Amino acid sequence: MALDGSAAIKPDKYGQVHEPALWQHLGEFTALEQEGNAYICRGTKGSAAIVFLSDNVFRAKIFHGEQVDLTTTVAVLPQSGSVNVSVSEEAERVVFRTMSIQVAMDKRDLSLAVEDLNGRLIMQQQPVAWNARGEMHALYAMPEDSHFYGLGEKTSFLDKRGEKYTNWNTDVYAPHVPEIEALYESIPLLIHMVDGRSYGLFLDNPGRSDFDMRSQETLFKIGCSTGAYDLYFIHGPELKDVVKRYTGLTGRMDLPPKWAIGYHQSRYSYMNQQEVLELARTFRAKQIPCDVIYLDIHYMDEYRVFTFDPVRFPDPEGMIEELRGMGIRIVPIVDPGVKKDAKYAAYQEGVRENHFVKKLEGDIFFGEVWPGTSAFPDFTEDRTAEWWGEKHKFYTDLGIQGIWNDMNEPALFNESKTMDLDAMHGNNGKPLTHEELHNIYGMLMSKATYEGLREQLNGQRPFVLTRAGYAGIQRYAAVWTGDNRSFWEHMALAMPMVMNMGLSGIPFAGPDIGGFAHDTSSELLIRWTQMGAFFPYCRNHSAIGTVRQEPWSFGEKAEGILREYIGLRYRFMPHLYNLFHEAAVDGLPVLRPLLLEYPNDPNVVNLCDQFLIGNNLLIAPVYRPDTTHRAVYLPEGTWIDYWTGEAHEGGRHILANAPLAIMPMYVKAGTMLAEGVLKQSADDAAEEKVTLHVYGAQASEGFTATYQLYEDDGVSFAYQAGAHSELAVQVTGGSDSVAIRWSYSDTAGFRVNREQLGFTLQQPGFVPQDVAGLTKMSLESIEAGHEGWAWDDVKRVLHIQVVDRDEGGQLVITV
Ligand code: MIG
């Protein structure tokens, strides 16, 4: 089409309109001021505020002028405690020293270097730069032996060296390919490991941010497009220290309700009440454990949140009650878009009470999503978050305790895939554009949801699942990795993705098991479920129009294998729950890359097709079709094959035999695992009998294995007021004997429902002759529940069963 008038000679027809941006810096150091606990370093063209939050964590926020603003986003929790910092001004630098690190600011350009107390360089920054468009960045030294981790939910392998990513929460329908730089979540935390020593850099900026470990040979870059350069340095040197300190900064999750770590079944969508009830009955009839069934968008009345379709779901309350009788809970989906409909209460209220995101000019911002034209709550306003939380009474009144947040990037059906960048957020009186707050929108939605549920559930623990998130999301929700496909490649990808999410503070994560889009196959579903049974978040979900993938969809043989592995998850529930407790206490993830436990082993820096559950259970899934063997790397120590009992020396690769029914698993000798009874749902009131498996015990001085089992009621917050107990088990070798001691502590407010305690010694280095005070009997008698011991000579396992006692006890095994 011919253009008339001046438009015909629009400048952009002639290439680049903008001149390349001019980069500015803070300039030379002029003065050091102190305001409260902040050191304000003045430069000729800007300022940097340095705040020490502990001996190992400090914040460095950059300001273009003199004005200093030390507010943070909600990602960062208020930090208490004072830090002793000694400051000294030298000729060329200003040096801040704590008990652990020394931070040197270069007086020429206010760039930072961090050293340990021996003067060993940890981190070297080049001067922070910005341009007239508001973009900011800094480059950092990248020595030869550099490896990178963290960054939350990203594609590619475990080690992010050579990768480049953008943080901009995005719903892309074909998302899980290596060139995708932005996914649903944004966790701007980069962990840099050099020679086995790690530190973290967290850029607290909820606008667009970029991490580039690819473009330059000896430098990496961290930048943002808008907002502040607000950087936190997190010292290691152990990788675990970084994770613990990062989660100290951005928070840890509370213990989830136990049912939330059971097996979950979903589909887009279970279409009506009858179908949901049939599904639940099938799980029970087939004795496949299941705790949750999800309701995807079709449960709603024309996609209006806080409604049920009256035809498809005529009696949600009755349905939910019937499901509860079967030990199954409902988790419905809730999207942020509220249908523009003058007759719809949530919309009316939102307009009347001014809860929706608006344009600067004052009009409500509308976008297209499932319900058609919709408005979006402004979760940056506390009063709106509260309103949204209260709206969930609709669900909690029906007996619902968990909510699934989707589309909260926010995802819209338009070209930019999200809200207009100039839509305004009230932000509690400090208005900012959507461009500046985009990445925090989804987390604020889950926060509002979590807090609302918590308010309404009378002391019961809520469960929230989210697709979008920002740093700190772990405080409010579990995260699933969005729309993967039923591809073997996506099964493999879930491992490094969830590992890095764990290193980024999100312990409760997992992919759609079986794959969401595309058609799964019998073999893929089997292999994926074997692996998924050990993922912290365990849900089978599939898209509309795809092949069915409930556990019985592929005949009896497949069903049998799936039952076995889902059952294994339930048998290991005490151990899994224990690991969730650890995550709640110190932020360490449930599913770990081997690297987290063996940071000095060069074989594991990018190992991401096998993983650890906790520190001692190694899982090596098969993630290719028609494959019955795979290479497994065992780190130092002795590892015992979970299935065969065979012991392997570590520090080398082995070839594992893995026919379809077997996923290779190994337990480290000298450690223990707690196994419970097989239940059909996690909060089944059955006796909490626990068996402690001791691997590779030796009747010699120096052998010890210990285990701490944390237990509570699994559903309420009473544990926070002390209602929990800890079972401590210690196994020690002597010459010609092994002693097992157990004791309980902290039982004041909580007593576990347990009559019996089991112990097994798996592959001990001896044949037991006697267990003092106990009768030797057959394995069958042990299985029938008698107190005594039995030796299985074929499998080389000693079984012991005793009456449990509050005061604990002791067993001596002689050889
Ligand atoms: O545009 O609710 O990732 O799990 O089934 C698709 C329908 C919207 C995307 C989610 C998926 C869910 C689907 N949703």
Image (cartoon, rainbow, N blue to C red):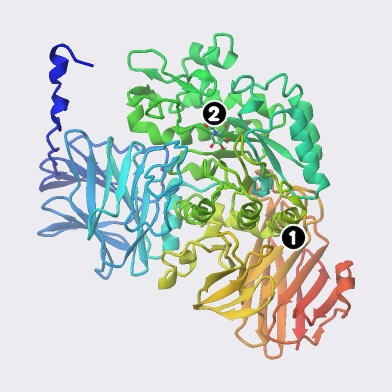
Q: Is residue 480 among the parts visible in the rendering?
A: yes
Label 1 vs label 2: CA separation? 37 Å
User: Callout 1, which amino acid?
Assistant: Gly
Q: Quadrant of the C terminus?
A: bottom right
Q: Position of residue 163 (x, y in %)?
A: 33, 53
**Residue visible at 62% across and 23% down in the picture:** 306
Q: Circle 1 — which element?
A: loop
Query: Residue 582, percent across and down?
Result: 57, 57
Residue at the farthest bottom position? 735
> Residue 689 falls in which quadrant of the image?
bottom right
Indicate if the residue with disc 2 has its beta carbon within 8 Å of ligand 1.
yes
**Picture coordinates of residue 458, whole percent (x, y):** 68, 34
541 vs 200, left or right, is right
- The answer to whether 473 is drawn above or below residue 81 in the figure is above
Residue 17 picture location, percent across and down: 14, 30
Residue at the spot of label 1: 676
Q: Which residue is mark 2?
A: 335
Earlier residue among tags 1 and 2? 2
In the image, is 788 to the left or to the right of 568? right
Residue under the point 63% across and 80% down: 647
Is residue 55 visible in the rendered image? The answer is no
Q: Residue at x 72, y 63 (%)?
A: 675
**Which amino acid lies under the numbered mark 2 shown in the image of this protein?**
Asp
